[in-house]
Image (cartoon, grey):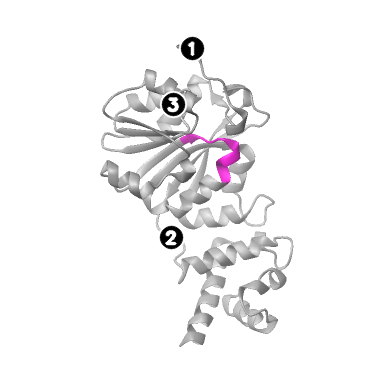
Amino acid sequence: MSTGQLPRARKRFGQHFLADQSIADRIVALVRPQPGDLVLEIGPGRGVLTQRLAARGGRLVAVEIDRDLVAYLRQRLTGPDFRLIEGDVLDLDLAQLLREEGRERLLVVGNLPYNITAPLLFGMLERADHIRSAVLMVQQEVARRLAARPGTKDYSLLTVLLSMRAQVHTRIQVAPGAFRPVPQVHSTVVEVEFEPARYPVQDEKLFGRLVRTAFGQRRKMLRNSLLGMGDGQREGLEELAAAAGIDLTRRPETLSLEEFGRLSDAFSGARNTAEA
C-alpha cells in the first residue's frame, strides 16, 4: 500500500467501510462523548468515525485488527488523547484497559463487522459492568433480534440475555449505499444502554444456563427443552414450573424476561432446598 492510498476492504475481516458523512455525524451525536469520558471504538477502519470522535474531546481508544488500516490510521491520527491498539477486539481485556486508562466505565461505538457481531455482543454482556452505553452499527436482522418482543420470530437467546442488562433503542436505518464496498444487506444503528440487572434473580449463572437450555431447542415445548436443567424427571419440572406460574406447553420464544426470571428463581430455590 503506497502512501495516501486507501486500504482495501478485506473479505476475511468482513469489512464494509462507512462512507456516508451524514450518517457518521449522526452516530457521533448519539455517542455524546464528553471531556473525561473514555470512548472505545471497535474497528475504526478508514477513520470516518474516529476523526469525528477525536475532535469531540475525551479519551479515545480504537482497536483495529487489520495491520494495513493500523498503519494508515497512525499516519493520520495522533495526539495525547488518542490510542490505537492493533489486535482482535474479541481478545481485549476491558478490565485491564480501564485500569490502564484510569477509568471505571466506558462508552463503546463501532461499525461492527458482520462476522463477529454475535460473539462481540455476548462478550459485551459478560463485561456489562464496565460499559455505560454502546452505539453500534449492526446488520438489520440483528437489530430486529436485539429489540424483539416475546412471541415474535426475531425473539431469541440474545434478546433475552441482553434485555437482562440493557435497554436497546433502534436509532438509524442505513442503506447499503452508505458503505464501500456496498454490502448485500441493510444496516441499523442501535443504542444499547447498560444498567444493573433489570430483573434481579437469585443466581445469574443459573438464569443464563436456563435461557440457553430453553433456546437450544426453541421449537420444542418447555416441557421437553428444559429436561436437561434438572435430573430429567418431568414430575419435578412440572412442580417448579407451577411454582413460577409457567405453562410448560409454551415455547421459549413466548416467555418474557420476567417469566424466565421467575422460572430461574424456582430452579434456584429448589436447588438451595436440596442442598440445605
- Magenta segment range? 110-118
**What residue lies at 26% left-to-right and 34% top-to-bottom?**
35
Query: On residue 2, which mark appears?
Result: 1
- Corner quadrant of residue 40: top left
Specify the amino acid type for callout 3: Val
- Corner quadrant of residue 177: top right
- Above or below, 89 against 76 in this view is below
Mark 2, secondary structure of its residue: loop
Specify the amino acid type for callout 2: Ala
Spatial CA span between label 1 and label 3? 14 Å
**What residue lies at 47% left-to-right and 70% top-to-bottom?**
203
In this figure, which residue is indicated by the disc labeled 2?
Answer: 197
* Quarter placement of the C terminus: bottom left
In this figure, which residue is indicated by the disc labeled 3?
Answer: 70
Mark 3, secondary structure of its residue: helix
Spatial CA span between label 2 and label 1? 50 Å
Of callouts 1 and 3, the N-terminal one = 1
Specify the amino acid type for callout 1: Ser
